[in-house]
Amino acid sequence: MTVSYRAALAAPALLGLASGAAIAAGDLSRQTPIEVTVELGAPGKHEFTPKQLRFETGKLYKLILRNSSNDPHYFTSHAFSQMVWTRKAQVTQQRDGKSVTLAEFKGAMREIEVYPGYTAEWWLVPVAAGKASDLRCDIKGADGKTHAELGMTGEIIIE
Ligand SMILES: [Cu+2]
């Protein structure tokens, strides 16, 4: 009993040392994120600003999707979602001039919809290089046209 207790204690201690070194060298999710902000529309305008986004593989990004317009907007790119690993997505809100996190989502992400006046963050690490030309917002306006048809499209390049 005593022996196995000691062994159980010693093993995690040794593992802890070993994995501590491994985390410092190789855990890409623990990097300080590079912030990239995309404006989803503006009052009276359906467009992504900027329209072209650039990322590098192996770096942690905080992709900030800010909607200052009066309409909900999607950030949809199936191709992009296949080239990144998602650490988390979270919903934040400004309170007394400070950004407060309201919710966090873990798991693979396909698209994010952000409602008027709010911001969402997609924390991700690009894992494959390539071009995603399918960034768009498919929300349909009162005129029957999608925001993408009105110009809300974009391109994402991963180097
Ligand atoms: Cu839209």
Image: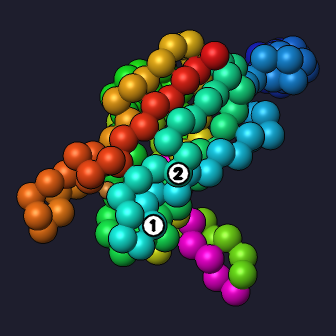
The residue lying furthest to the left in this view is 144
State which image quarter holds ligand 1: bottom left
Asked whether, in this view, residue 129 is left or right of residue 97, the answer is left
Q: Which residue is drawn at 57% across and 73% down?
A: 93
Residue 62 appears left or right of 23? left
**Callout 2, which amino acid?**
Thr
Disc 1 secondary structure class: strand
Could you say where residue 101 lies in the image, as x and y percent from the top left? 60, 66
| Residue 156 on image: x %, y % | 50, 29
Kindly report the distance in space between the C-alpha atoms of the residues bearing marks 2 and 1.
9 Å
Marks 1 and 2: in contact by CB < 8 Å? yes
Name the residue at 56% across, 66% down. 92
Residue that badge 2 annotates: 49
Pointer 2 local density, CA inside 10 Å: few below 14, some 14–19, many at least 20: some
Q: Which residue is located at x 67 percent, y 22 percent? A: 56
Q: Residue at x 52, y 57 (%)?
A: 39
Q: For the magenta stretch, what is the residue range?
A: 89-96
Mark number, residue 144: none
Q: Which picture quadrant has residue 125?
A: top right
Question: Residue 10: percent from the left, percent from the top?
Answer: 87, 19
Q: Does the magenta stretch include residue 93?
A: yes
In reply to whether residue 95 is colored magenta, the answer given is: yes
Q: Name the residue under label 1.
A: 42
Q: Earlier in the sequence, mark 2 or mark 1?
A: 1
Instruction: Give the side of residue 48 with respect to residue 140, left or right.
Output: right
Is residue 61 visible to the viewer in this orientation of the structure? yes
Q: Residues within 10 Å of mark 1 (few under 14, many from 20)?
A: some
